[in-house]
Each structure stands twice: as C-alpha cells, then as structure tokens.
C-alpha cells in the first residue's frame, strides 16, 4: 500500500520503486515508529479524530505488532516502500478502516524526524554506556601498573618521563569529553517535531506540549519549515561518533606501536590478536588495526551527510532519505569498536621493566635537569644550554644518563652541584610535577580517584 497516489493516473515503474525503497535499512526504526504512532493516536483522540475506543484499538494493535517485530520473519516478503507504510499496512490488517485515520494531520516528513530522534536518544545513551565501560577498563589497567614509568612523546620522539596511569588518563579525558558530546547530541535530538506537518504546521489543534510529555521530549521545535529541512541533529550524532572513533584510532595506533617487537612495552591477549597463514611467528594486532580502519568509515559517514545536505533548498527533499544509511553505519561501527577496545584493554599486559629501561636509556630527564638548575638560580636559557651540551657530550661518548656520577656532573658544569644527579633517574624528576594535571605520583593518584568518581557519576 502507499500513503499517496490519488493525484496519479499511472503507477511508479518497477525500477523507481526498487531505487527509492528504504525498508531494508529504515526497518530498524520500527519500535520508534510504533511509539510515535501510539502517542499520535492519543493526540488524535484529544482533537476528536479518534474515539476512545478507536484509540485503544490502535494502541493495542501497535503493541502487538511491536512484539511481532522482534521475530526474524516479521519483515520477510515485505515489499512496502518504507517502515512507515509497512506499519500502516500491518495496522490495517488488525484494525481495518480505523487505521486510515492514524495519519490525519501528520506528514511523513515529521514522522521520519520523530522516529530518528527517538532512535537517536536511545543510541546516544547506548554509546555512553559502552564508552563508560571502556573508560573503566582503562582505569583498571592504569591501577594494575600504577608505578610504571614510560617515556612520553612529542613528534614521536622521546620527550619526558610520565607515569603509565598518567598516559592512560590522557585517553580517559578524551573519552570523558566524548561523553559530554553524546549528551549534547542527545539534547539536539530531544526536540519534538510532531505538529509541524509537512512544512507549514498541522491544520489540527494538537497539544504539542502534551505530545512532548507523552514521548519524553525536553522541548518542542519552534519552526515547522526548519523541522522539515533539519538533519543537524543527525550530523551532531555523526560528529560525536567520528570524534570518539578518532580517539579510539589514536589509542589503537599507540598500542600497535607499543606492542611491536621494536618497543615491546606491552602484549595483547591471544583473544584479540591473530596469526599469519604463512609466517608461524606472527601475532598481529588485528583488533586494533580494525578499530583504526573503521574510524575512516565513520568519518566518511559524517562527510557523506554533510555533502548531501549542503545544497538542499528548504524544506524537505528526497535526498534526505540518504541520512539513514550513514547514520546506522556509523552507530554500528562505533558500538562495535567501543566493545572491541574494552576487550583489548582488559587483555593488555604491560612490561614495566621494558618501559622503565626505555626511559632510562633516553634523555627524557633533560628537562628535569634544566628546571632544577633554574630553581637553583641559573637563568633558564643558560640552564637549557648547559643540559643540551651534556646531552651532546653523552651522545658522543655513548653514555646514558645513569652512567653519569654526581662527581662527573659537577666536573662537567659546576651548576650541577647540590644533588642534581638524583634527577638522572626518570622517576625522581616526576616528583617535581605535582601540579594539578601533572604526572607527579600524588597528582596522578588523585586524578585516578577523581576519574573513578566521574565515571560513576556518568553511569547514574
């Protein structure tokens, strides 16, 4: 059945019907479409279109259809144009002519917007739940090796020593911001479009405030033309998804590098790695590589919808049907990647001896030495020059920081007197970085405690 056709003498071509059909992907909106239609039936009763008996009949029938829709065979053999026409057909099979009243004063434009907003509200919460689980896994991993020292990098060159938990907390902060983005995306979606009609507003005096309360919306759209043309709320979701995936991809890249033979800092469990069909020795980080790869797909989904929307005149255009496939694709890849990242994090085994050796062998202590000189009264530019010359001399002689004695440092430059030699141990220099947000042991311990509380608050 179709929701239109009276103006037409001929039938759509088979090619056009096949080309424009969307049921194969918008079918996942069935629950949202049912919830919206039930609320609309109650609104129709209030304006006198449906009797109380008819409203009850429709609402009950839709509830039964909702249960049936959970069965795999529910959609088998359906040739309906979209999920909305399928639902009307199923409703009419159960209730007869009364089903023809359900679309009174309602456009598919606002119906689609409503369904997607309902679906997105739930999906934003789903993403947050998965993200919180990953964040908790990262905190577990941080606490498992709370005293481990690793080199921190800039330009992929060893820069300064940091604690392993401090490193993981950097990703925690990224994901915490992502959680806030999901709140924002949910808020953008949580606006009732019903009552807007196709573009000019409904011709029936619906109580939009009551409909919003019925469906749990926080606010009501203010302009019917804007609602018909709007997919910003979908773009907000896609942006949040793309940013979260970007952060996952960066974490994946780090761990791909850190688990390589050249680094050997950490090992992934067998359950999240794979082997080679040719090379028996291989243990490949496929799970992380797939997360990194899927990031590109999600960014592509955001780009695809932005390009689709950029040239559309007001208000609705059929191009906007192309919003759903990138939306669903991004949501699926995001949830799958978050689940995978959590499992990977739970499998990680750090090699603290290897990371500490990596820090000790490099000159990540150089800044600590320069700042110690500055605290003793040496102008920082001069301190920078002194330590730079020490590094250069060490490289020429093949000496690591730990190879220098206090006496040798004093002889190299008298400014090093006063216990500066202890800072040749990377763990010692960290103790001067107890500033809020720094890698000092006490600051990091406090940050871990705070992070636990923040995750718990997000889960409430």
Image: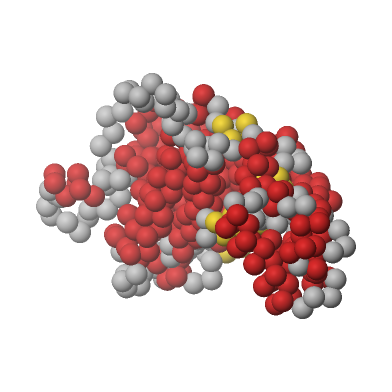
Q: Residue at x 53, y 46 (%)?
A: 254
Q: Residue at x 13, y 54 (%)?
A: 9
In terms of image quadrants, where is residue 350?
Answer: top right
Q: Residue at x 64, y 67 (%)?
A: 389
In terms of image quadrants, where is residue 279?
Answer: top left
Left or right: where 160 falls relative to 328 = right
User: Quick check: 267 above or below 289?
Assistant: above
User: Which quarter of the rendered picture does the C terminus lie within?
Assistant: top right
What number of labels is visible?
0
The residue lying toward the viewer, choosing from 208 and 75, is 75
Can residue 75 be seen?
yes
The residue lying toward the viewer, choosing from 363 and 213, is 363
User: Which quarter of the rendered picture does the N terminus lie within?
Assistant: top left
Q: Position of residue 255 (x, y in %)?
A: 54, 42
Left or right: where 99 falls relative to 426 = left
The residue lying toward the viewer, choosing from 346 and 459, is 346
User: Quick check: 74 above or below 79?
Assistant: above
The residue lying toward the viewer, choosing from 162 and 419, is 419
Q: Residue at x 77, y 78 (%)?
A: 379
Can residue 105 be seen?
no
Q: Position of residue 262 (x, y in %)?
A: 50, 40
Report the colour scheme: secondary structure
Q: Position of residue 213 (x, y in %)?
A: 64, 54
User: Quick check: 260 above or below 311?
Assistant: above
Left or right: where 262 falls relative to 307 = right
In terms of image quadrants, where is residue 96?
Answer: top left
Q: Position of residue 358 (x, y in %)?
A: 62, 45
């Amino acid at each position: 059945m179709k929701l239109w056709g009276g103006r037409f003498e001929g039938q759509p071509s088979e090619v056009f019907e096949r080309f424009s059909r969307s049921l194969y992907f918008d079918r996942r909106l069935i629950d949202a479409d049912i919830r919206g239609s039930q609320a609309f039936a109650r609104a129709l009763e209030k304006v006198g279109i449906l009797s109380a008996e008819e409203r009850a009949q429709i609402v009950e029938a839709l509830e039964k259809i909702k249960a049936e829709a959970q069965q795999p065979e529910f959609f088998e053999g359906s040739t309906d144009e979209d999920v909305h026409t399928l639902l009307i057909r199923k409703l009419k099979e159960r209730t007869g002519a009364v089903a023809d009243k359900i679309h009174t004063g309602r456009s598919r434009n606002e119906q689609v917007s409503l369904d997607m907003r309902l679906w997105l509200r739930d999906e934003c919460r789903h993403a947050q739940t998965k993200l919180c689980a990953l964040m908790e896994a990262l905190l577990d991993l941080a606490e498992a090796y709370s005293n481990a020292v690793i080199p921190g990098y800039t330009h992929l060159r060893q820069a300064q020593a940091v604690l392993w938990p401090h490193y993981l907390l950097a990703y925690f902060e990224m994901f915490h911001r992502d959680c806030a983005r999901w709140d924002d995306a949910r808020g953008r979606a949580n606006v009732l479009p019903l009552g807007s009609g196709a573009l000019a507003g409904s011709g029936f005096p619906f109580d939009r405030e009551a409909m919003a309360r019925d469906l749990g919306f926080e606010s009501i759209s203010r302009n019917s033309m804007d609602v018909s043309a709007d997919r910003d709320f979908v773009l907000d979701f896609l942006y949040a998804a793309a940013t979260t995936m970007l952060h996952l991809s960066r974490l994946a890249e780090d761990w791909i590098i850190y688990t390589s033979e050249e680094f050997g800092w950490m090992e992934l469990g067998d359950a999240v790695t794979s082997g080679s069909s040719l090379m028996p020795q291989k243990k490949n980080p496929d799970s992380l590589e797939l997360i990194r790869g899927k990031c590109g797909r999600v960014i592509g989904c955001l780009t695809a919808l932005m390009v689709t929307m950029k040239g559309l005149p007001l208000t609705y255009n059929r191009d906007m049907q192309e919003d759903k496939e990138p939306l669903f694709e991004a949501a699926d890849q995001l949830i799958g990647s978050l689940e995978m990242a959590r499992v990977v994090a739970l499998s990680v085994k750090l090699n603290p001896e290897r990371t500490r050796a990596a820090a000790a062998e490099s000159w990540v202590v150089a800044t600590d030495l320069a700042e110690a000189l500055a605290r003793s009264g040496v102008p920082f530019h001069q301190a920078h020059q002194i330590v730079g010359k020490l590094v250069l001399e060490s490289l020429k002689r093949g000496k690591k920081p730990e190879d220098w004695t206090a006496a040798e440092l004093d002889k190299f430059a008298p400014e090093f007197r006063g216990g500066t030699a202890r800072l040749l141990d990377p763990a010692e220099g960290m103790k001067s970085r107890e500033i809020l947000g720094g890698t000092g042991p006490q600051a990091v311990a406090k940050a871990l405690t705070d992070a636990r509380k923040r995750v718990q608050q997000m889960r409430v």
